[in-house]
Image: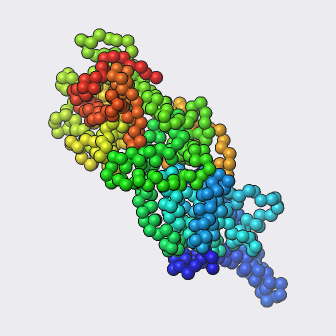
């Protein structure tokens, strides 16, 4: 039989699907039990076998209970049938826009002897899966019939004569740009093989039942308007949660059986190539995550969205292979045909996937506007990096003005018009008077500070690498390790857990003086006010198309990239931005883009290095000596005014 072979996993999946359907049948039997008892009592009274005494009262009570139970069961069944299952936001790929891709997938399905997917969609993530979109919520509305029994009968499975619709194949968009055609085919083979078990009637019916229960639980959990609605939804939610808990174990084992059957069937197709291609999957995931957090996020915060993210991941991974010996040989694949050639217009698809990524990971509007415009990689340094640094530097000086800080606190330096880096350095420097006036920490000595190995050593904001603090040999490490790598002196792991909450708690002991902590708190408050005053990011022009209803704008972003920054991280980012502005205006430095580290500062054509430890020494210890030495060596004049936004 096509699609459902004799694989052990397929048989196990079918047995688990039958277990799920038995639970559905038992629930239906429980709902019909009072009605059956009422029918027996009514028939017995009509024939005279059950009559006299208390049987008449019992008959009316049981009949009333049966009617109430049937109405409740019908309402719950209707609620489950009409609940909209969760569907992943994707970019639909029409067949006329990617005929080669559809041809490759159908050829793969023929080789696997399974039904071909009904459609293909792209997601801005490094993953691929099959998704069932046959529910009535993702289909055109049916004709008005005035009868709700169709929704109830849908729980019992597909009607006779109804042809099953194959699921949609969702492909990660970075795979199309980084992988070659042969590698993509090998990676998709186990995924496409899953259409075989999905076509089995029992498995399809069990999946529809579980997805309907899951959607009903989510709808019942939404806040209701009135007390009556809350009471009704509470009852429906209790019943659906009970059924879902009963099915959970069987449904999980069913999906494992489907995956095992698909993997077993896919072994006959490109198995050797798949082993090699799996290495590219991990590499693509690392490059995509690095590109989003280090490169795309600063642009999204400035109201710009990179329109070629998928092309950027190729550049990032190519740069990684150049720097890291672990990735040697990966670029030799670039001579083969890339999978994006299977698309008729790769640039248009890349732009749509990039805009969807901005919506999912940042919550941007659905369409372009004055405050939400695309940006190309050539314009990225000027439109994103330069604007980010000057905006942060301007915010830093606005907070200093609000706190009454003079233009310069050095009596030997004449006040100049315009903001200067010296003003910031003098304000953060710990003097002898500050040391004598500082309260002693518990146990004596200066207040204990968090070690530089904590997360603030490399702030979560991707604008931090603008100073080029990440060395080339570190790029093969995970992002989590890099956040704690730049400084090795002092610090213990116990201090890391309290950093990054965004509320400032626990950061006071890590800053040099009380006025430094006050400046960090002022910057955090100013950022919070700006974010509160900004318009809703999800309130752009309404998007059209079949995927418009797949998410609610109030839920965006679905996958935030980073937690809120702490006050120390915000202060370090702003001081670094001010230094970069001074370097550009007084030393001829230019903003740049590093594919792995994001915004970077170029001095004499080379990346500036070792700036982050010096900035942290200033804000944590109040010691400007290492930073001033670096500024002097780089030819940066802190006493000169800089241009701000």
Residue at the image position 80 percent from the left and 84 percent from the top: 43
Residue 16 lies, in percent from the top left, at 55, 76
Q: Is 276 positioned to the left or the right of 71 in the image?
A: left
Q: Is residue 448 among the parts visible in the rendering?
A: yes
Q: Residue furthest left?
A: 444
State which quadrant residue 509 falls in. Answer: top left
Residue at the image position 28 percent from the left and 16 percent from the top: 409
State which quadrant residue 427 falls in. Answer: top left
Query: Which of the image's four quarters has the N terminus?
Result: bottom right
Residue 58 lies, in percent from the top left, at 73, 78
Residue 594 lies, in percent from the top left, at 39, 39
Q: Is 407 positioned to the left or the right of 108 in the image?
A: left
> Is 472 or 290 nearer to us in this picture?
472
> Is 322 or 332 nearer to us in this picture?
332
Query: How are the colours assigned in the image?
Result: rainbow
**Placement of 641 over or under 73, stated as above or below:** above
**Placement of 71 over or under 535, stated as above or below:** below
Residue at the image position 38 percent from the left and 34 percent from the top: 600
> Is 152 or 345 nearer to us in this picture?
345
């Amino acid at each position: 039989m096509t699609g459902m072979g004799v694989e052990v996993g397929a048989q196990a999946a079918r047995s688990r699907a039958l277990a799920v359907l038995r639970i559905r049948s038992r629930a239906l039997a429980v709902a019909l039990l009072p009605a059956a008892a009422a029918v027996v009592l009514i028939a017995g009274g009509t024939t005279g076998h059950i009559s006299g005494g208390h049987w008449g009262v019992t008959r009316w009570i049981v009949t009333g209970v049966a009617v109430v139970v049937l109405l409740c069961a019908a309402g719950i069944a209707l609620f489950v049938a009409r609940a909209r299952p969760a569907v992943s936001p994707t970019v639909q790929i029409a067949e006329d826009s990617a005929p080669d891709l559809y041809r490759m997938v159908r050829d793969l399905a023929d080789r696997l002897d399974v039904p071909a997917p009904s459609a293909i969609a792209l997601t801005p993530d490094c993953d691929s899966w099959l998704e069932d979109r046959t529910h009535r919520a993702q289909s055109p509305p049916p004709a008005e019939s005035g009868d709700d029994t169709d929704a109830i009968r849908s729980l019992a499975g597909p009607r006779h004569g109804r042809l099953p619709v194959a699921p949609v194949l969702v492909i990660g968009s970075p795979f199309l740009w980084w992988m070659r055609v042969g590698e993509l085919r090998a990676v998709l083979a186990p995924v496409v093989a899953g259409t075989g078990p999905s076509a089995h009637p029992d498995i399809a019916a069990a999946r529809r039942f579980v997805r309907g229960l899951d959607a009903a639980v989510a709808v019942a959990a939404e806040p209701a308007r009135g007390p009556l609605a809350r009471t009704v939804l509470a009852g429906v939610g209790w019943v659906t949660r009970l059924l879902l808990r009963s099915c959970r174990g069987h449904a999980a084992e069913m999906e494992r059986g489907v995956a095992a059957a698909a993997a077993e069937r896919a072994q006959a197709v490109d198995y050797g190539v798949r082993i090699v291609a799996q290495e590219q999957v991990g590499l693509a995931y690392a490059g995509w995550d690095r590109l989003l957090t280090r490169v795309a996020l600063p642009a999204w915060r400035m109201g710009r969205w990179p329109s070629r993210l998928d092309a950027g991941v190729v550049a990032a991974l190519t740069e990684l292979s150049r720097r890291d010996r672990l990735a040697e040989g990966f670029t030799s694949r670039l001579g083969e045909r890339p999978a994006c050639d299977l698309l008729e217009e790769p640039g248009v698809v890349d732009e749509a996937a990039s805009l969807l990524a901005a919506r999912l990971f940042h919550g941007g509007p659905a369409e372009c506007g004055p405050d939400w415009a695309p940006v190309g990689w050539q314009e990225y340094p000027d439109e994103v990096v330069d604007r980010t640094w000057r905006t942060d530097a301007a915010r830093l000086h606005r907070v200093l003005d609000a706190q009454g800080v003079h233009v310069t606190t050095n009596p030997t330096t004449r006040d100049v018009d315009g903001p200067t880096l010296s003003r910031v350095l003098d304000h953060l420097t710990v003097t002898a008077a500050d040391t004598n006036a500082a309260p002693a920490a518990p146990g004596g000595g200066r207040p204990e500070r968090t070690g530089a190995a904590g997360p603030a050593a490399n702030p979560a904001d991707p604008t931090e690498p603008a100073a080029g603090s990440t060395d080339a040999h570190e790029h093969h490490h995970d992002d989590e390790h890099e956040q704690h790598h730049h400084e090795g002196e002092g610090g213990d792991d116990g201090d890391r857990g309290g950093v990054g909450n965004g509320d400032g708690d626990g950061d006071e002991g890590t800053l040099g003086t009380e006025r430094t902590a006050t400046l960090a708190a002022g910057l955090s408050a100013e950022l919070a006010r700006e974010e509160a005053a900004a318009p809703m990011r999800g309130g752009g022009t309404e998007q059209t198309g079949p995927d418009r209803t797949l998410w609610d704008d109030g839920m965006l972003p679905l996958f935030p990239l980073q937690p809120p920054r702490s006050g120390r991280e915000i202060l370090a980012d702003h001081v670094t931005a001010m230094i970069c502005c001074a370097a550009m205006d007084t030393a001829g430095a230019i903003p740049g883009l590093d594919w792995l580290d994001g915004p970077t500062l170029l001095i004499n054509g080379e990346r500036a290095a070792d700036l982050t430890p010096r900035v942290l020494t200033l804000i944590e210890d109040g010691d400007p000596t290492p930073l001033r030495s670096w500024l002097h060596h780089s030819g940066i004049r802190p006493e000169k005014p800089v241009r701000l936004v």
